[in-house]
Image (cartoon, helix red, strand yellow):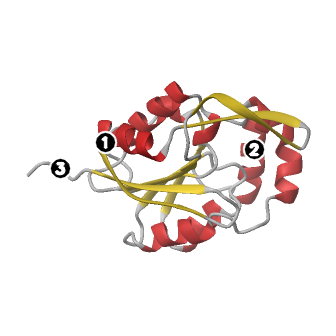
Amino acid sequence: MREYDLIAEWYASVRTDTTGVPEATALASSLPRGSRVLDIGCGNGIPLTKTLLSEEHRVVSLDSSGAMLRHFRLNYPAMPVVQAIVQSCPFIDNIFDAAVAWGIMFHLNPEDQIRAIANVSRVLKPGAPFLFTSGDEDCFHGKVSTMNGVEFRHFSYSTDTYGRVLRDHGFTLANVHADSGNNTYYLAKKADSPS
């Protein structure tokens, strides 16, 4: 995202809190050690990539911002990271054991959110969890917020609509909750393969 290119230096200096860490830890600890996890919208890798790695998983990170990825590569020089958008996720089918998308989905317009969910479903193995954050009400035209002087648009579906969109792409919505900062977490599970 161009907006994150504009704030990458500032973001690297201020993103030091633990928001999202309990949810990422819960997901990571539910997986067998060495699971392959897709970290969507990884940014500079702190704190969520660090959390996934601490559980000894094989993490592959993806972000569209080249400036954010420069910081990521400083933090994790040996880790695989791809500059791309999740709407056209450049990975083969059924390769990942889980996916996390913290702070990315609500930046995508409604159509791109559907494309993103479809692509995450495609790259996840049957039974794999998908944890993401977004809003919890229909917002199709984009609310505007400002971060370090840069405007961002935020879009979302309602919880019921996310449930339907997820079902349409082979997921079951397992849990929805908000943290103290009003981040809404959606935990979905891809359907198991038919026997």
Count every numbered label the image shows and give the total.
Answer: 3
User: Residue shown at 62%/68% (left/top)?
Assistant: 21
Mark identifier at residue 193: 3
Nearest to viewer (mark 1 / mark 3): 1
- Residue 169 pos. (x, y %): 32, 37
Identify which amino acid the numbered label 1 is placed on.
Answer: Arg
Determine which of the numbered discs, if any, sits on residue 167 in the image: 1
Disc number lying in front (2 or 3): 3
Residue placed furthest toward the left: 195
Q: Earlier in the sequence, mark 2 or mark 1?
A: 2
Image spot of residue 160 (x, y percent):
42, 44
Q: Amino acid at mark 2?
A: Met
Residue, disc 2: 68
Judged by depth in the image, the label closer to the viewer, 2 or 1, is: 1
| Left or right of residue 2: residue 26 | left
**Residue at 63% in and 56% down:** 183
168 left or right, relative to 63? left
Whether residue 63 appears in this view of the structure is: no
At which x and y percent is residue 33? 41, 72
CA distance separating discs 2 and 1: 32 Å
SS at badge 1: helix
Task: Pick the residue in front: 84 or 115.
Answer: 115
Task: Give the image location of residue 42, x and y in percent.
Answer: 63, 50
Instruction: Say left or right for 174 vs 70.
Output: left
The mark that comes first in sequence, 1 or 3, is 1
Is the residue marked by circle 2 packed among few (<14), some (14-19), or many (20+) residues within 10 Å?
many
Q: Nearer the viewer, residue 96 or 188?
A: 188
Q: CA distance from mark 2 to mark 3?
A: 36 Å
